[in-house]
Amino acid sequence: MDLKKLAGQAGQFLTRAVQYTEEKIGSAEKTELDRHFESLSLQADAARQWTEKLVIGAEAVLIPNPGNRVEDMIFEKIEKRRPNRLSNLEYLGLDMVQAGNDFGSGTPYGSALLKVGGAEQRLGLLEREFVSNAIQGYLQPMRKFLDTEMKTITRERRLLETKRLDLDACKSRLRKARSMDGQSSHKDAVDPKVLVAQLQAEQELLEAEAELRKAQADFDRQTEITKLLLEGVRSSQAAHLRHLNELVEAQAQYYEQCHKVMTDVQKEMASVPFNPSAVGAFDNSVPVFQINDEEIDLKSPSSP
């Protein structure tokens, strides 16, 4: 471990903390960035906030189950893929098909269950395909924007803030060094102690000026780097528009296919025999019990 380097980093951290505290209480000056830079920063913040909201909203629509969303996130982190699970529509369709087979495909109800169950399974498959297409075409690119570009901008803006604190701390040190040099220059230089103090003040002034030049150069360079990244956020909206179009195309195709499936199953259901009078007769049937070979109508007034 390099103790000198560690001590230097601790000293820089302490200097920045002091500068930050003095700025908050109003006893130190702060270098302000230009209006164009501040405008770019506000635009970047808005882009990040709205993209995060849009991603969260799209995830809730595509994967309504929060548990499934967590499971998908874990699988994507570990295995780089989402689990291939059946949709609720497919489970419903599977139950309908099994029930239809149990009731018998030759019965009207069993036949209808088989037809509707098959349609529900096709809808579920279409839903899974739509979710997969929407995730690949919209969610993943938007997440990538947040995880790469926006994280890089956040990191560079934090670095710019540290460079700004270093610059303002150097400015404060230079002002103090000039004040000390001005005070020592008015004293009698014949006294050795005064002469030593003057030399020390001059040396501190030279060091403070050199540190300020370096801090100013570092700050200017970091400002340009951060500004270029911020300007790139605006151009990323063209890519976001393309991803949004892909989401719309996936939704339009999905709903069109679903409409066709339901239209077809409606036509198939029209061929299933259905006798409302038979159902009504069954609903209005009178319960009859047989006791000692004698049938008793429970609704008959003469029944005991």
Image: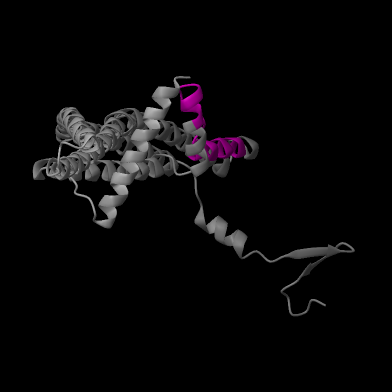
89 to the left or right of 289: left
**Is 151 in the magenta?**
no
Please determine whether, in this image, residue 295 is positioned above or below residue 182: below
Find residue 251 and report its image quarter.
Answer: top left
Pinpoint residue 228: horizontal percent, then vertical percent: 15, 29
**Is 92 in the magenta?**
yes
Find residue 175 and report its image quarter.
Answer: top left
Please provide the residue range marked out in magenta: 74-100
Find residue 6 and report its image quarter.
Answer: top left
Pinpoint residue 172: horizontal percent, then vertical percent: 21, 43
Q: Residue furthest bottom?
A: 301
Please determine whether, in this image, residue 114 is positioned above or below residue 2: below
Residues 232 and 68: in front is 232
Please determine whether, in this image, residue 149 is positioned above or below residue 16: above
6 to the left or right of 297: left
Residues 10 and 119: in front is 10
Residue 134: tell me if it is visible.
Answer: yes
- Count of numbered badges drawn on the protein: 0
Residues 233 and 276: in front is 233
Q: Residue furthest right?
A: 292
Residue 263: tell me if it is visible.
Answer: no
Residue at 15% x, 43% y: name it: 187
218 to the left or right of 79: left
Pinpoint residue 9: horizontal percent, then vertical percent: 37, 30
Q: Residue furthest front?
A: 190
Residue at 78% x, 79% y: name it: 302
Rendered-image quadrant of the C terminus: bottom right
Residue at 51% x, 52% y: name it: 275
Pinpoint residue 77: horizontal percent, then vertical percent: 47, 26
Q: How is the structure coloured here?
A: one colour
Magenta span: chief secondary structure: helix
